[in-house]
Amino acid sequence: MSETVDRERVAAAVRELLLAIGADPDSPELASTPARVAESYTEFFAGMGQDPASYLSDAIPVGADTGELVLVRDLTLRSMCEHHLLPFRGRAHIAYRPGRSVVGLSAIPRVVDALAARPQVQERLGEQIAQTLADGLAPEGVLVLLEARHGCVSDRGVRQADAVTVTVASRGVLADPVQQAAVFALLGQGGSDGAS
């Protein structure tokens, strides 16, 4: 859990929020809510102060025998929109064409989780994941496809519960449209709705 989240201050702020909306924070139904929200925010924002590149420090050198595409698909994605502090959820699909090293497959979801567990926007999140992998692994190319449903779109404003936002960030050889099309074909884009 993040050491950067001040639980007492979060709980005090939630108490004030409850008062501001006309609720009684001392009622039996709400008395524990400030502490519960503080605990959940500690989890939601556990990426604050984390260095996602640290998960790539154990890269394995493989020499000239690399070049095959590595694709990790259907990673569960959960983040908090920085505009309304409402969640967005979906899937992350990460592809990279190795340079001289590869990384253990569990490192990739850890990078995603560390960057997602902070106030975010989906467009920046994809770019940050791509850049972290590019900097940490020096691959020939990186492609990050994120698909998510946003609470700020489904639960307020336009209230489009089925809307899915898709973003793509790429670097190196995977910025080429032909190379991207090959990755998209592997992902089976169009055949399934990955955001859930």
Image (cartoon, helix red, strand yellow):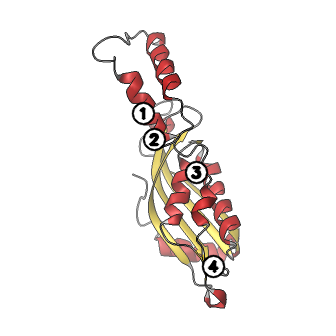
Q: Residue furthest front?
A: 3
Task: State the separation of the CA atoms marked 1 and 3.
Answer: 19 Å
Q: Residue at x 65, y 49 (%)?
A: 124
Callout 3 amino acid: Leu
Tell which of 30 and 68 is nearer to you.
30
Closer mark to the observer between disc 3 and disc 2: 2
Q: Residue at x 53, y 30 (%)?
A: 6
Query: Residue 101 shows which numbered tag?
Result: 4
Q: Residue furthest left?
A: 28
Q: Work out whether mark 3 precedes mark 2 in sequence or the reverse, and give the earlier one.
A: 2
| Rendered location of residue 63, percent (x, y) | 65, 87
Number of residues whose C-alpha sits closer than 10 Å to that of mark 3, classed few (under 14), some (14–19) or many (20 or more): many
Q: Are marks 4 and 2 in contact (CB under 8 Å)?
A: no
Query: Residue 115 shows which numbered tag?
Result: 3
Tell which of 5 and 184 is nearer to you.
5
Callout 2 amino acid: Glu
Q: Which residue is mark 1?
A: 39
Q: Work out whether mark 4 precedes mark 2 in sequence or the reverse, and give the earlier one.
A: 2
Q: Are marks 1 and 2 in contact (CB under 8 Å)?
A: yes
The answer to whether residue 78 of the structure is visible from this angle is: yes
| Rendered location of residue 195, percent (x, y) | 43, 54
Callout 4 amino acid: Ser
